[in-house]
Image (cartoon, rainbow, N blue to C red):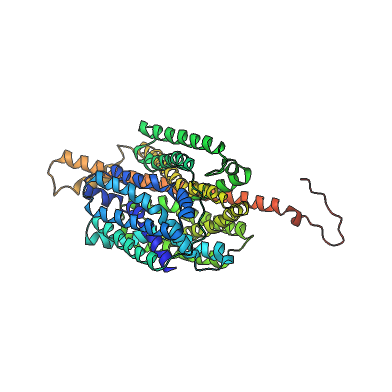
Amino acid sequence: MLASTIVALTQGLGLSFLTVNLQQVAGPLGVTTNEAAWLMAAYVFPNASLGLFLFKIRMQYGIRNFAEIAILIYVLVSIAHLWANDFTSAMILRFFAGAAAAPLSSLAFLYMIEVFPPQQKLSIGQALALTAIALPTPVAGLLSPGLFDLGDWATLNMLELGLSLVSLAFIYLLPLTSPPRMKVMQWMDYVSFTFLAVCMGCFAAALTLGRLYWWTEAPWLGWMMAVGVASGMICAIIELNRRNHLIDIRWITSREIIHFAGILLLFRILLSEQSSGAINMFRQLGLLNDQLQGLYWVILVGSLGAGAFCAWLSRPGRAEIIHAVSLLLLAIGSYMDSQSTVLTRPEQMYFSQFLVSFAMGMFLPPAMAVGFAAALQRGLVYILSFLAVFLATQKVGGYLGSALFGSFVTWREQFHSFRIISRLNPTDPMLTARLQQYGAAFAKVTQDGNLRSIQGANQLSKLIQQQAYVLAYNDAFLLTSLMSLAALGCLCLHMAWRHRHALFKPRDGETPVAVNN
């Protein structure tokens, strides 16, 4: 279990450090924040889909060989990062780091479920494994201030290298139980996966960069998505005409799997409230990572508590109840966040963000257990198809949720800024006094009255934009809450329909009532 946690931190901190410290990383590399976001895009491009193909490689060549080679590659890439002093080399190495980190998430999962007997692997083992995989983001926020006190981006790379070496020792000292090998690889698998990887990678990269460069302002975003659509169509055509599938397109497009994927995708979008909402709002208010330490601790405790709760409660048949509670907690937490002002600080959001992180940790384990069990009933070949659905909804869906949330906030910020500015009256004495007050703050810097007036107007403009951003985030939080309640209502109706025969079962001595199907 300790090995699983260390490996999970190793594979996730690479991207989490970039997400949490994008501005601090951009400085040492001499690039803008938007340019530094290309490091994230380079990381997610191979990482979004490679885990699917590595599942087959693991089946054919054995877990032991797979684990040793995977961690060795990651160590070598981490060592190479120590010499990444410019943006180009850093982006190339981030691409290889994303590819090398893909197998580590599988290893973290396998090490955790290795501890438990077969009947508990899909309940307790899976819940704790997914909890360990969710730890890197809050841990990255907790560690970043201390690491930047010791140095710049190179210190983050040094920590990644240290964790990879510890993971290397764990993997070589604690070999996993390896099932019998079987020859499952075919040459068409490589062709099909190439198109699938391009599809998922293009969408992941475009969704990561779209809201920064804006969707209608960068033509290359449209071309990237077009390449993703074309690659996905070619992969589907190949798979539909194969006897031995890499992924079963017909099963994936069945009503049950589309319903399952839709639920996962919707909830992944809703969970962007925490990763792209509260933390980003505080950054817009000027708070840094060291001022968000308490909030990261709350998120970490919420994730751990949810994992323990799911491990204790998760049993077959309880997934719908757990999902209903999760949606209710998410709706309550998001509504509480929607009451924020420019004076709101992390302490006022501890309880609401605890509810959101708890909801996040509760939802995924039972959902994955249901899908995994359905795939196992059809055979090992369907596990790959299930993994394709799961990766698409969780990884690409996570980027989609962040993109939609961020784009909605940008749109609403423009609306609120225009609304606030349109209500300002230049002849209002309160406005004039406030502009003079802001301009007077620059009296020690310049004696030019016109320049002080310009600086005062700029200061007022920044405050208006800050207020508009808070209102925009409140709109996004409220929308998340309403969508959560709508999803909860749909889930309750679905549960009532599934159990309609039990609900309408006649009591003793009563005449049965016909229920139309």
Q: Is residue 290 visible?
A: no
Relative height, residue 49 to residue 344 (above, below): above
Q: Residue at x 86, y 58 (%)?
A: 510
Image location of residue 369, percent across then percent down: 57, 57
Relative height, residue 101 to residue 237 (above, below): below
Q: Is residue 397 visible?
A: yes
Q: Residue at x 48, y 43 (%)?
A: 189
Report how many numbered discs are placed on residues in the image: 0
481 with respect to 494 (left or right): left
Query: 513 or 106, which lies in front?
Result: 106
Quadrant in the rendering for residue 159: bottom left
Query: 507 or 237, which lies in front?
Result: 237
Quadrant in the rendering for residue 3: bottom left
Image location of residue 401, percent across then percent down: 46, 46
407 with respect to 123 (left or right): left
Task: Point out the image quarter for the C terminus.
Answer: top right
395 with respect to 447 (left or right): right
428 with respect to 390 (left or right): left
Query: Can you name the residue that lies furthest to the left here?
Result: 447
Image location of residue 273, percent across then percent down: 45, 51
Image location of residue 472, percent across then percent down: 41, 45
Relative height, residue 293 to residue 449 (above, below): below
Q: Residue at x 47, y 46 (%)?
A: 397
